[in-house]
Image (tube, rainbow, N blue to C red):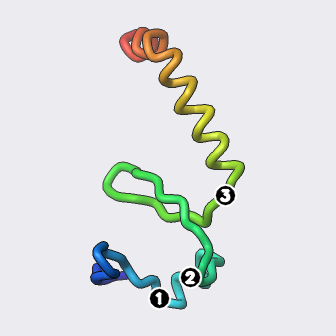
Amino acid sequence: MKLKITTVGNSAGVVLPKELLARLRLEKGDSLYVTEVPGGIKLEPYDPEFERQMAVAERVMHEERDLLRKLADS
């Protein structure tokens, strides 16, 4: 699906067609969670539990970065 970037005030935005909103089970006013993936981005309905899990993962990766680096070198 090809989408066009448009001006929204002083920002830029993308209009999501109603068919895409239906597939994502979203409505106007809902929030999206955007994740970078290899080759692009992934849009998902906002999930507070997923956000909490990501915050925990980021904290662990930061606190244990030396250990994770050693494991990656193994």
Q: Quadrant of the N terminus?
A: bottom left
- Dot placed on the residue nearer the N-terminal end, 1 or 3: 1
Q: Label 3 amino acid?
A: Asp
The residue pinned by badge 1 equals 17
Quadrant location of the C terminus in the rendered image: top left
Mark 1 residue type? Pro
Q: Which mark is residue 21?
A: 2
- Which residue is drawn at the image coordinates 31% and 54% (left, top)? 39
Task: Check residue 47 in the rendering and tell me which mark sits there, or answer none.
Answer: 3
Q: CA distance from mark 1 to mark 2?
A: 6 Å
Left of 73 or right of it: where is 25?
A: right
| Residue at (50, 24) in percent of width and height | 61
Give 70 or 63, whichever is nearer the viewer.
63
Locate residue 43, reporting x and y percent: 49, 64
Instruction: Measure how far apart labels 1 and 3 are at the Cα level.
Output: 21 Å
Residue 33 in the image: state x and y as whole percent: 54, 59
